[in-house]
Amino acid sequence: MAGAILVFQPVVMAVGSPFAGRLSDRIEPRIVASAGMALTAAGLFLLAFLHGNTALEFVIADLILLGLGFALFSSPNTNAVMSSVEKRFYGVAAGTLGTMRLTGQMLSMGIAMLIFAVHIGHTQITPEYFPVLLKSTRSAFILFGILCSGGVFASLVRGKVHLEH
């Protein structure tokens, strides 16, 4: 059941990414990517409201929002990066983009584990620790929402890809 619920986010991302990529060909990729980052930040902030009795519909709706946010960010961001380099540097740009993506994932996981370690410590998570686990996840989602909000502004200030004629 959990797997069926968690699949909503990547499915929405897979379906939405091609549309977001085409949209970023028509309008400035930084605008589309920034909108996606804003939706992702909103989705992360909403996850901070999870509790033991959160409705499944809330979780699914939030995962759909996150999938849409990731879709709107990923393709236009890649478009902007790849459009900013000469063809002979496509390999380097793609490699750098992949490295940055993986570095961000590793850093995020490290931060999440640090938050869990500070809140929970070195103990097995049993039902008596569920409130502390929820407090940890709330802290993580708020922090990542704040970082993602900063990313909206970083995305907005980058240069234009589509030069006006």
Image: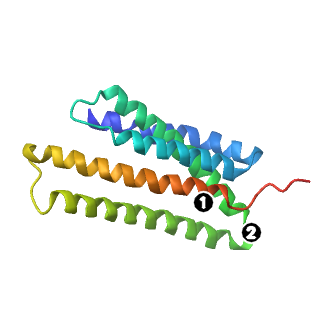
Q: Which residue is mark 2?
A: 87
Q: Amino acid at mark 2?
A: Lys
Q: Quadrant of the C terminus?
A: bottom right
* Residue behind mark 1: 154
Dot 1 falls on a residue whose secondary structure is: helix
The quadrant in which residue 91 appears is bottom right
Q: Is residue 87 above or below residue 26?
A: below
Q: Position of residue 103 (x, y in %)?
A: 44, 67
Nearer the observer, 20 or 18: 20
Residue 89 percent across, percent down from the top left = 69, 73
Q: Amino acid at mark 1?
A: Ala
Residue at image coords 20%, 49%: 133
Tell me: 81 left or right of 143.
right
Residue 96, position as x, y percentages in the image:
56, 70
Q: Counting other residues with Cα less than 10 Å from the Cα at mark 2, is it few (<14), some (14-19), or many (20 or more)? A: few
> Which residue in the rendered view is the most extreme toward the right?
165
Residue at point 75%, 45% (across, down): 27
Quarter location, residue 60: top left
Left or right, residue 3 beside residue 82: left
Image spot of residue 138 (x, y percent): 30, 47
Nearer the observer: mark 2 or 1; the answer is 1
In primary-sequence order, the first of circles 2 and 1 is: 2
- Quadrant showing the N terminus: top left
Q: Is residue 128 above or below residue 97?
A: above
